[in-house]
Structures are given as C-alpha cells and as structure tokens.
Image (cartoon, rainbow, N blue to C red):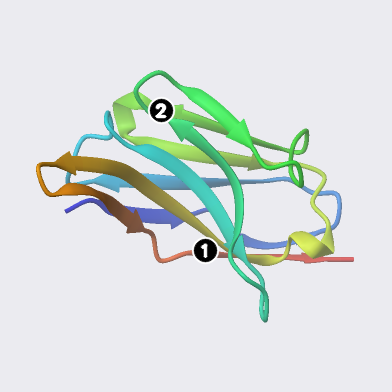
Amino acid sequence: QLQLVESGGGSVQAGASLRLSCAASGRTLGTYTMGWFRQAPGKEREFLGRIVWSFGGIFYADSVKGRFAISRDNAKDTMYLQMNSLKPEDSAVYYCNALRVITTTQGEHNDEYWGQGTQVTVSS
C-alpha cells in the first residue's frame, strides 16, 4: 500500500503564494505518475498537473499553467505544488494522487491512491 500525506495548506490573501507537499510512503514511486487535483465545494474534482516519477516529465492543466509549478524531491519521495498569484477561485481542498496501470494476463487495472487533502483558502 502507498500512503500519501498532503501538507502546506492554509488561509492567505489574494496574490500570495503557497507551497503544498505530498509525502509518499510504503512503496517506491518509480512506476507511478503523481498528480495534483483540487475540489471546491459543489464542484467536481479538477486536475491540475502531473509528474511521471521515473523521468520527471511534467504536464499542467491550462487553468494553472504559468502560476502553479510541480517539483519533487526524489530522496524524500515528496512532490510539491508551488502556487503563485493565488486567487479566491483557487480556494479548494487540494489532493495528491498516485497512479500506475498494472497489466496482467487478465488485463489492465489501475493501482491508484489519494491523500486526505489539504485546505487552501484565498480571500480577496
């Protein structure tokens, strides 16, 4: 089992920055793609970006490209989300995710884990 623990959320003013962390334990991350998502009240969970842990390739959703940045510390098995120029509409619970596809003789299935989430509140 892979455990994911987010931290770094809080309440900030618009324009501020925050850095979220996602610490993984229980398994090595080499075969996983790690991602950040958020969910605001009454809205669906929104994809923000992902990093392929094996080679570090990063992809961002258009909604956060240029303001948010994903990074990692391999030695600590930790992923980060640097959020700059925060807006009130960025207020949400932020989650990290680990996903890999396992192929067996019976077919493919997802091996997926979520953290518990960390609250980010941005006031105007």
Dot 2 or dot 1: first in sequence order is: 2
Task: Examine the rendered structure and indicate whether residue 57 appears above or below residue 65.
Answer: above
Q: Quadrant of residue 46?
A: bottom right
Q: What is the x, y in percent for residue 119? A: 58, 67
Looking at the figure, which quarter contains the C terminus?
Answer: bottom right
What is the three-letter code of the residue carrying label 1?
Answer: Thr
Left or right position of 19 against 35: right
Q: Which residue is mark 2?
A: 73
On residue 75, which mark appears? none
Q: Quadrant of residue 91?
A: bottom right
Q: Residues within 10 Å of mark 1 (few under 14, many from 20)?
A: many
Q: What is the x, y in percent for residue 43? A: 67, 74
Task: Examine the rendered structure and indicate whether residue 8 appears above or below residue 81.
Answer: below
104 and 121: which one is in front? 104
Q: What is the x, y in percent for residue 47? A: 59, 52
Q: Which residue is mark 1?
A: 118
Q: Residue at x 59, y 32 (%)?
A: 59
Residue located farthest toward the front when viewing the structure as drawn: 106
